[in-house]
Amino acid sequence: MADQNLMEKIVSLAKRRGFVFPGSEIYGGLAGIYDFGPRGVELLNNIKKVWWSANVYERDNYYGLDSGMFKNPRVWEASGHTSGFSDPMAECKKCNTRIRVDKVLESVGATADEKMSEDEINELFDAHRAEIACAKCDAHDFSRARKFNLLVKSNLGDFTSEGNEAVYLPGEACQGIYLDYKNIVDSMQPKIPFGVAQIGKAFRNEISPRNFLFRTREFEQADTQLFIKPNENKEAYEQMKKDRWNWYLSLGIKEENLRFKQHENLVFYAKDAWDIEYKFPWGFDEVEGIHDRTDYDLSQHMKFSNANLHYTDPETGEKYIPWILETSMGMGRAFLAVLVDAYHEDELGGETRVLLRLSPKIAPVKAMVSPLLKNKPELVAKAREVRAELKRVHPAIAWDDNGNIGKRYRRQDEIGTPFCVTIDFDTLGETPELKDTVTLRHRDTGAQERLTIAEVAERIRSAIE
Ligand code: ATP
């Protein structure tokens, strides 16, 4: 399967089956914005639940947070976003396509570092211009690169009056954790090391949104910040890398499609930085960053806010600014990795079929119940009863009585539903020894077995646990 083709198939399936829709579609869309449909929101919420469990519930020293998106404009000065959060952009002089100069330089083996000035980037760009062609029209004629700030501006309150400055939508979600660090220390009295976990929205004025959910202008980040004692970073950082790697495996993602990549150019304050990359149809690309950030973030906020963000050790009385180890995952990128990993085509009963081999734990629908024939009220009534019973195991039990049974199974295969349950005349007692048994059909193999309703409930329960 050509990979470009694979991506098109996934985008098409995502729309056809209610996972992801282009934003504002009836108005012609809005670049870089997507909506999660009825099945997408279930899958997304399930991924979030697994993330929250692993990062909050299964740990004793992590706290959850949901901070407000708008922040005092000073926050983005302290974090360096108003001055330094920019991508170098150039335009093809022939067809006006915009490119991210750092990314195209990377593709020809050159690194444009975040600290470089516009002149330095242009020097590097000039040295490689001959190797860089426009992806759209193949021309080699680009404008000079200029730095383009990614923060999205907005207004709050009476923005017409003079002196009322603009506020920004969050360029990254994690700033809320730094701002509430002191409140968490005061209200929860945690002992260091402790962590804070948050899933929050981020907005970036991306120059060229692309690759479906991979590079969008509105997205969610699932972040953890671990506050540690200065210089006690090494072991905790290695553990963090391991935990995050294993988390992707727990979603059912195949290990051969993951890899670690260490950053070559560290920002001046960072001790180490690694990305977890997934093998998307266009190649390995970043899903998550894991950063060893020293005391930079809290020190900056101390400087700009004048607040005292020192931590006092309750036993020794020692005072220090905690260092931070961070994990930051793009939720849309993780969602896309899950879809790509689960997408399969195989042959069943002499026909090609498309299926999502989603782990039952995150599948949007856990089982579909259907009566063999929809015009037989006694079958429909029994099937409704079975569905109600299975809903006690999990609420995401679908109903489908459209078309023949084969079509219903195929539809559920595309949604990634692990089980289909069919009620027929034997369920009603036509063959007395089969009374109150149903057909359980398995998504991955197409195999069918005859089980009691209680056995089916148990199968579903153990698969999703
Ligand atoms: P990139 O180099 O791809 O632009 P980044 O290194 O700037 O990403 P971070 O600022 O470290 O990304 O953000 C943490 C995570 O947020 C990334 O690993 C990614 O999963 C996600 N993310 C960043 N930008 C976007 C975007 N435009 N669309 C979707 N997810 C994003």
Image (spheres, rainbow, N blue to C red):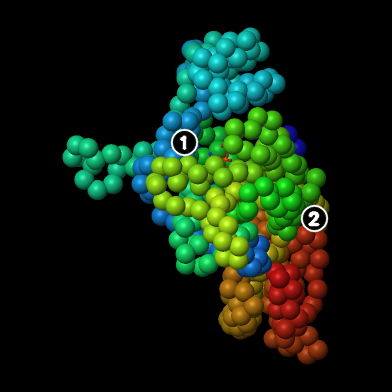
Say which amino acid is labelled 1.
Answer: Gly
Name the residue tied to disc 1.
80
- Label 2: which secondary element: strand
- Label 1: which secondary element: loop
Q: At 70% from the left edge and 79% from the top edge, which residue is drawn?
A: 457
Q: At 37% from the left edge and 42% from the top edge, which residue is drawn?
A: 74
Question: Tags 2 and 1 in contact by the CB under 8 Å rule?
Answer: no
Tag 1 or tag 2, which sits nearer the N-term? 1
- Can I make out residue 78 in this image? yes
Of residues 393 and 247, the one nearer the viewer is: 247
Which mark, residue 348?
A: 2
Q: Nearer the viewer, mark 2 or mark 1?
A: 1
What is the x, y in percent for residue 381?
59, 82
Indicate whether 107 appears above or below 327.
Answer: above
Indicate whether 378 appears above or below 463.
Answer: below
Task: Please tell me in which quarter of the rendered image ligand 1 is found.
Answer: top right
Of residues 261 and 266, the one nearer the viewer is: 266
Query: Neighbour class for label 2 at 10 Å: few (<14), some, many (≥20)?
Result: few
Query: Neighbour class for label 1 at 10 Å: few (<14), some, many (≥20)?
Result: few
Q: Quadrant of the C terminus?
A: bottom right
What is the x, y in percent for residue 219?
51, 46
> Is 214 placed left or right of 234 in the picture?
left
Q: At 64% from the left edge and 44% from the top edge, which residue is drawn?
A: 292
